[in-house]
């Protein structure tokens, strides 16, 4: 019996620590092809490259794994992966493991999750994995165990068409993880501000900064489950229709 075909990408770039642990987690589960960005692409959302050529190079970076680095975005990488597979369809697409969480509205900005959503658009079961740590010394060992467990379950059971999973993993050792909670995303937002600076030539420039804060006290949301050391799984879809508003708006138009 042939192994499932797994397409792997991320938004932190092919040299990132998280993608190495993702590959290690599933290398015995299926046959892997990696198409990952040449450099970090965090915050790119569902952007694609249309005004410049996309370059893609085969690399010898992951031992015994067919791998490519791509100058484009995470979504470009998924599209390029389909092209490189020459008509073969992956059984699952995995994106990550991201440095930093992708809870709540972060999913709209996340390149990690955009890659998973692109997979869902193609009708392929897809999962974005994120670890709640931005540290260069982040320990991905526990996260890799979670990745293997969830990936095997989805390969066995599948996902609803048009749906992908947003998986966030607390930054604790495996024995401290209390379990898995399937839940909804919380209502949290970035309170943006800009750090205004002046370069040596006297020209002004800005760094986007700010803080991320939750706007609700509900307990059954990803943000709060993560605080309690649960892995969270939020089923995510690309259909952004607000169905509750359809009939009401028909009264206006």
Image: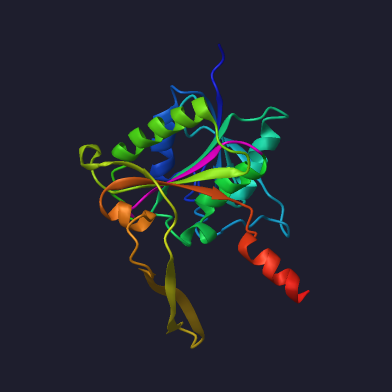
Name above or below for residue 31 compared with residue 35.
above
From the top left corner, tell me how far across and down residue 191 is, in percent.
Answer: 42, 75
Q: Residue at x 35, y 62 (%)?
A: 218
Left or right of 188 in this view: 224:
left
From the top left corner, tell me how far across and down residue 240 is, in percent.
Answer: 62, 58
Name above or below for residue 24 compared with residue 50.
above
Please report the bounds of the magenta region as a residue range: 123-133
Give 31 or 223, whichever is nearer the viewer: 223
Figure quadrant of the N terminus: top right
Give 226 or 20, whichever is nearer the viewer: 226
From the top left corner, tell me how far across and down residue 67 is, in percent.
Answer: 55, 33
Whether the magenta-drawn stretch holds residue 125 is answered as: yes
Give 49 or 69, whichever is nearer the viewer: 49
Left or right of 184 in this view: 176:
left
Whether the magenta-drawn stretch holds residue 128 is answered as: yes
Residue 50 seen in this snapshot: yes
Name above or below for residue 60 compared with residue 183.
above
């Amino acid at each position: 019996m042939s192994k499932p075909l797994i397409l792997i990408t991320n938004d932190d770039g092919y040299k990132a620590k998280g993608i190495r642990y993702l590959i290690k987690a599933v290398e015995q589960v299926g046959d892997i092809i990696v198409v990952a960005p040449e450099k970090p692409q965090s915050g790119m959302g569902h952007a694609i490259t249309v005004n410049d050529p996309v370059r893609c190079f085969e690399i010898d970076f992951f031992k015994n794994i067919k791998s490519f680095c791509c100058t484009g975005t995470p979504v470009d990488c998924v599209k390029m992966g389909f092209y490189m597979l020459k008509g073969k369809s992956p059984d699952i697409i995995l994106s990550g493991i991201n440095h930093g969480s992708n809870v709540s509205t972060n999913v709209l900005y996340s390149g990690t999750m955009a890659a998973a959503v692109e997979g869902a658009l193609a009708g392929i079961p897809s999962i974005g994995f994120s670890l709640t740590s931005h540290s260069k010394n982040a320990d991905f060992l526990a996260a890799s165990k979670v990745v293997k467990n969830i990936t095997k379950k989805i390969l066995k059971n599948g996902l609803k068409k048009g749906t992908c999973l947003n998986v966030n993993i607390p930054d604790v050792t495996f024995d401290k993880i209390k379990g898995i909670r399937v839940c909804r995303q919380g209502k949290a937002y970035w309170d943006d501000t800009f750090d205004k600076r002046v370069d040596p030539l006297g020209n002004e420039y800005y760094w986007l900064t700010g803080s991320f804060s939750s706007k609700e006290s509900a307990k059954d949301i990803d943000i709060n489950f993560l605080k309690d050391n649960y892995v969270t799984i939020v089923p995510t879809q690309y259909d952004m229709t607000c169905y509750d508003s359809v009939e009401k708006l028909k009264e206006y138009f």
